[in-house]
Image: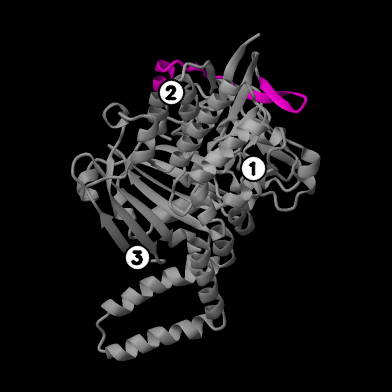
Amino acid sequence: MTIENKLYTLKYNPDTVSHLTPDIKQCKKCKNKPCTYVCPANVYEWDSEHENLVVNFENCLECGACRIVCEKKSLKWEYPKGTKGVTFKLG
Amino acid sequence: MNKVDVIVVGAGPAGIACAITIARSGKKVVLIERGSFAGSKNVFGGAIYTQPTKEIFPDFETSAPLERKNTEHKFVILGEYDSTTISYKNKLSESYTVIRAKFDRWMADEAKKAGVYLVEKTVVRELLTENDRVIGVKTELEDYYSNIVVLADGVNSLLAKQIGLRKDIEPKDVALSVKEVIKINNINERFNLKEGEGCIHQIFGGAMLSMLGLGFMYTNKETVTIGLGVTLSELVERGIRPYELLEDLKHHPTLEPLLKDGVLEEYSAHLIPEGGYKKMPKLYADGVMIAGDAAMLVNNLHWEGTNLAMISGKLAGETALEALDLNDFSENVLKNYEQKLKNSFVLKDLMTYKDLISIASKKSDAFFDYYLRKVNSFFKMFTSTDSVPKRTKYREFIKSFFKERKFSLFSDIWNMLKLIWSILK
């Protein structure tokens, strides 16, 4: 089963602005980019053509792993606003 | 100005236990939860423990939304294709499976009945301080003031970090857990259970062979929960996607038939504090205490977390009541919280296992790979009927340890003894 299909099972109320803000200048220097594979919701994708980190924040499960693995410690990470983000029905 | 006796941040087991303890003594307490309702952001493996839950909610067995009463505990050691299982069964149960969205919400309702003022859909953005003393919280909408703030804001606890009670978490101090709740029609038949009874699987090896990680499977009323937790640093170093690891685990020949034709109801993920005693933050400061996951209170060997959360919340609540009686909210009084934790199983157990993670991670190739495989190869040898004389087989098996581990064998034994000594001394 693909991660997209897994994420379809979740209830989200996405915000219009991202609660995850990477510092792209630092991302460009980051070799390993662990956020692009450790994230359990595949939120981060590196666009090598445009040298940009795509952040699919609407899919975020709010676990906090990306913040901890960020090698440059340059990811601004906060909880989504009170009414926003994921709601677990079966956590 | 909104001023109350105590503000508790986070309506999980720690926060609710704390708030209800304070409210039951007639003090004014506000419990602030960032989710739409208590439980909506909360994820765990699957079971709450009967005795500690009764300490907060004496009648929960007759009134809380419970899934199944766990009567069987299975320890499953997976090889790549084979497995060995030890099962302990006892109809006297120690735990129940619950769904947090239902159970935490029920606990929060009980807290409201006891007089707790529950504020949902509200994120605490920072702590308000005055002369290094915590005096309240800043939310998106308004500021709240209190004599004491209790941080029960979960594993990420940005608030504890803000006031310097702890440093940032490192990838080796947390496990990333992913889980799936899968609908299955005939759970009783598949898991050989009576109505209302459940079974827990603790899973070693398999997809997680050689990694500092474990799998789990729990039975709910009509669903089965399967998941795994792996130390975050292992995922980073090996370049592993956690959900792919879970797919591999689900397809192990021992587990696959149990989940066959199941329908995925919900996927989720959460961090588990793994640092133990050595990585605990400072638990108190002027006007503030920390409880539950925010304080790293998890016993990873025994899979205990919600119970440590509830009891630490209760003890923080009792300490807050003492401080309110004395009208002194400084460290001098709040340090009693740490003493209470030290006198209870909470810190006693964390101290017992303080060396577990460092030894286990140093020897993960041994304890999470080689010896797990060896358990299976022992039973493979023992059950094989291939006209090789038994004595030859035993000798070959014993020789294989020396041949395969060489000098590591001595350091394996040494570390095992060191671990046992650290636990028993």
Q: Confirm whether the magenta stretch covers residue B114.
A: yes
Tell me which label, 2 or 1, sits earlier in the chain: 2
Residue B186 left/right relative to A49 = left
- Residue drawn 49% across the image and 86% down it: B403
Residue linked to disc 3: B83
Residue B285 left/right relative to B338 = right
Compared with residue A16, is residue B220 higher up or lower down, i.e. above or below? below
Q: CA distance from mark 2 to mark 3?
A: 41 Å
Task: Give the label, 2 or 3, closer to the camera.
Answer: 2
> Which element carries disc 2, helix, strand or loop?
helix
Mark 2–mark 1 contact, CB under 8 Å? Answer: no
Residue A64 spot, x, y in % from top left: 61, 39
Query: Quadrant location of residue A23?
Result: top right
- Residue drawn 50% across the image and 70% down it: B416
**Which chain contains the residue that carries disc 3?**
B
Q: Nearer the viewer, residue A80 or B44?
A: B44
Considering every residue shown, the one lying at the far top of the view is B1
Q: CA distance from mark 1 to mark 3?
A: 39 Å
Q: CA distance from mark 2 to mark 1?
A: 26 Å
Give the residue type that dot 3 points to.
Ser
Residue B5 spot, x, y in % from top left: 58, 18
Residue linked to disc 2: B108
Give the residue type that dot 2 points to.
Ala
Query: Quadrant location of residue B254?
Result: bottom left
Q: Nearer the viewer, residue A87 or B406?
A: B406
Residue B413 left/right relative to B110 = right
Q: Residue B281, which numbered label?
A: 1
Q: Confirm whether the magenta stretch covers residue B18.
A: no
Dot 1 crowding, Cα within 10 Å, few <14, some 14–19, many 20+: some
